[in-house]
Image (spheres, rainbow, N blue to C red):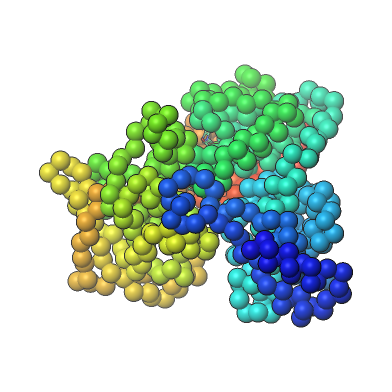
Amino acid sequence: MDREAREILASIEGKELSAKERAQIPHQDMPVQDPGERIRNMSEVALGYTEAEALVEASRCLQCKTKPCVQGCPVGIDIPSFIHKITQKDWKGAMDVIQESSLLPSICGRVCPQENQCQKFCTVGKMKKDIDEAVAIGRLERYVADRQADEAALPAIPAPTGKRVAVVGSGPAAIACAADVRRAGHDVTVFEALHKLGGVLSYGIPEFRLPKRIVDKEIAKLEGMGIRFERNVLIGRTRTIRELMEDDGYDAVFVASGAGLPKFMNIPGENYISVFSANEYLTRSNLMKAYDGEHALTPYFHSHKVAVFGGGNVAMDAARTALRLGAETVDIVYRRTRDEMPARREEVEHAIEEGCNLRTLSQPVEIIGDENGAVKGVRIRRCELGEPDASGRRSPVEIPGSDFTVEYDTVIVAIGNASNPLIKKTTPEIETNRRGNFIVDEETNETSMKGVYAGGDIVLGAATVILAMGQGRKAAAAINDYLASK
Ligand code: FAD
Ligand code: SF4
Ligand code: SF4
């Protein structure tokens, strides 16, 4: 593919191309590990563009004056501008443009649901009436960020202001907020309940989609900026928010504790042995390295036939992890059709290429156990699509009398996560909605408790990395204003 890209590049270099000619330049696929090979390792599936592929893909951009793609990016990266800099081979300039809006481009370039965000609005995709033909903005962002990863200097930190900020959690919302508050000269301490930093980026999203060295590098940058990290501290239990402010002297607190409480189906049989929440399953594998049997002590369940309930990114990650841990059959059981699946399209495609089966229009209604209390199978009811629901997707309607049973020895439930109730319980001053998410001021992300801000999944419900990061930055700007006036 690199050779083809170099040939295309040689044929267009130095030419003035019309919009039509640009749109005819072939879309550059992402090189990936071979499916047969990759299910035997945990290494990253998508290998990243070569320089020639990035230059060809960038040359497909029409530099639209109205920048429709920018409307689709939750943090408003100036996409045409960074792509133009790529075509000029101005890698530093491209990175500077991206970093004006995004602090985690290596991560977002990999995991953003681009087909529903920036790329959805791309003129090239629209001209060709095919979203796959849109300029591959996320891949280009990843290329620039990876290429410049070791080049960026740490930002200068002004003289200490004497103000102290506590950040709860260490996921993308926390990372973004901590960095921007520290850049204003305030002292920042991050409190993380787990022994490893990074939130879902570390414990949820598997290595084969997001290598942990990239997350570790972001954390190392924050440490280099003088941000302190306290691991194994559960705020709400070890210290409450009130204690942080009244006893420990923090002037402001940012809560980014995420949505880590797994939801279950509430169907019979969910207590059988070998029924896992996707959170537990993925945490064992990612954080406690259960997959690395030769070196890690964490046990994992040796499955043969696995059913994964759900159709989002979490379900795809759990299914693809189960394959890599040696399962022979993995069925993704989902009550709507593939078109309604909330997972990133690329993840669904990769799961299928690797051998996962999609069992769509299927609603699990009972988990069946054997005499030892272990999973033996799942009773499934067929569904059909009805009218659209509040999410705009057509809702599944169960077909009476259509039940059938499939043998499985493992069930992984991946139907979503709710917010962790601990901080809410120990800080009644913070108002929450009926789902337990913190209610915040839309402009500042301040909660109902003075000086306490919140952002990311604890506010939005289970959302995305880029939205969490955007909220962290918004809250940081408000915290910096608050501390300046305090
Ligand atoms: P989190 O990343 O959840 O971090 C919260 C942190 O707070 C955790 O480290 C937790 O241990 C810590 N914490 C919780 N309570 C306390 C406490 N009381 N005291 C101290 N620390 C505490 N999004 C995408 O955009 N693309 C994807 O492909 C994608 N895939 C996903 C795959 C999986 C398996 C999962 C679970 C989520 C995925 N998401 C994806 C969603 C995305 O990861 C989240 O929206 C994002 O991480 C939320 O960031 P956050 O900072 O709000 O919280
Ligand atoms: Fe697209 Fe995400 Fe990058 Fe924004 S941050 S340009 S939505 S890939
Ligand atoms: Fe380029 Fe597409 Fe954005 Fe137009 S919409 S500027 S073609 S990325």
> Which residue is more in the foreground, 90 or 343?
90
Observer able to see residue 459: no
Observer able to see residue 41: yes
> Which residue is more in the foreground, 137 or 457?
137
Is 458 on the left or on the right of 151, as rendered? left
Residue 419 location, x and y as percent? 48, 44
Q: Is residue 179 above or below residue 377?
A: above
> Which residue is more in the foreground, 93 or 442?
93
Label count reads 0
Q: Is residue 211 above or below residue 339?
A: above
Q: At x 47% / y 51%, what residue is drawn? A: 38
Is 227 on the left or on the right of 371, as rendered? right
Is 389 on the left or on the right of 445, as rendered? left
Residue sticking out furthest to the left: 371
Question: Which quadrant of the figure contains the N terminus?
Answer: bottom right
Residue 31 location, x and y as percent? 59, 58
Question: Which quadrant of the figure contains the C terminus?
Answer: top right
Q: At x 66% / y 25%, what residue is drawn? A: 228
Quadrant of the rendered structure where residue 379 is?
bottom left
Residue 470 location, x and y as percent? 68, 49
Is 397 on the left or on the right of 468, as rendered? left
Q: At x 15% / y 47%, what residue is drawn? A: 370
Quadrant of the rendered structure where residue 70 is?
bottom right
Q: At x 54% / y 48%, what residue is drawn? A: 44
Residue 208 location, x and y as percent? 51, 47
